[in-house]
Amino acid sequence: GENVEQHPSTLSVQEGDSAVIKCTYSDSASNYFPWYKQELGKRPQLIIDIRSNVGEKKDQRIAVTLNKTAKHFSLHITETQPEDSAVYFCAAGGRGGNKLTFGTGTQLKVEL
Amino acid sequence: DAGVIQSPRHEVTEMGQEVTLRCKPISGHDYLFWYRQTMMRGLELLIYFNNNVPIDDSGMPEDRFSAKMPNASFSTLKIQPSEPRDSAVYFCASSLATGAETEAFFGQGTRLTVV
């Protein structure tokens, strides 16, 4: 089955700096790569996703890049703000059945 | 739509007792997923259904765990007997098949504590 690895497990940045979280996946059939944000005590919520037919997608301060050859994808957050502090999960899916395999999460802390 | 609704939000039970977690997916969604979240193992997929039929239960840890989806608007995850290591947050999620993979919407979760 699919295996998703995520790094780093914790990330601390100064407000205004950029943050990058990286994931690798194992199943070459995967073609859907969402990112979820989970604030403390709350549910995971989708912030951005990318499909295998594109290499990059942007939404304001958030961007995701995908390298299908290398089987890795990354989340980039620019101009970080304190409200970006949360746990971020990457996931991979696409073998059918809308099934997602999640990475182990990255605790992002944005310090003032 | 109110989103995915789970109940209870919190459950504290004694070891050996039966626990039933409930989920109401978003109306019209045809996929339903049960996840377990712990600090050690992150978000693990336990089982998922398509049109009320279980598709993959390979993530169910033991025979003590069972899940049902009697109709399109209701699913249960049962643990019998419960053990302290079952303590976790259990999330239900639903999604809509459109021919391509789509967003999974999560419920608020049930925080289970087995003492």
Image (cartoon, coloured by chain):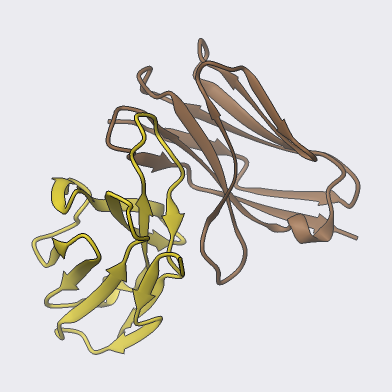
Residue in view at x 27 percent, y 74 percent: B22
Q: Which of A48 and A92 is in front in this view?
A: A48
Question: Color of chain A here?
Answer: brown
Residue in view at x 47 percent, y 61 percent: B39
Residue in view at x 43 percent, y 65 percent: B107
> Quick check: A108 above or below A29?
below
> Can residue B69 be spotted in the picture?
no
Q: Quadrant of residue A111?
A: bottom right
Residue B12 pos. (x, y %): 33, 88
Q: Is residue B28 left or right of residue B81?
A: right
> Quick check: B89 above or below A81?
below
> Can residue A107 be spotted in the picture?
yes
Residue A75 pos. (x, y %): 66, 35
Q: In this view, does A78 lie to the left or right of B39?
A: right
Tell me how many marks there are. 0
Residue in view at x 14 percent, y 84 percent: B16
Question: Color of chain B here?
Answer: yellow
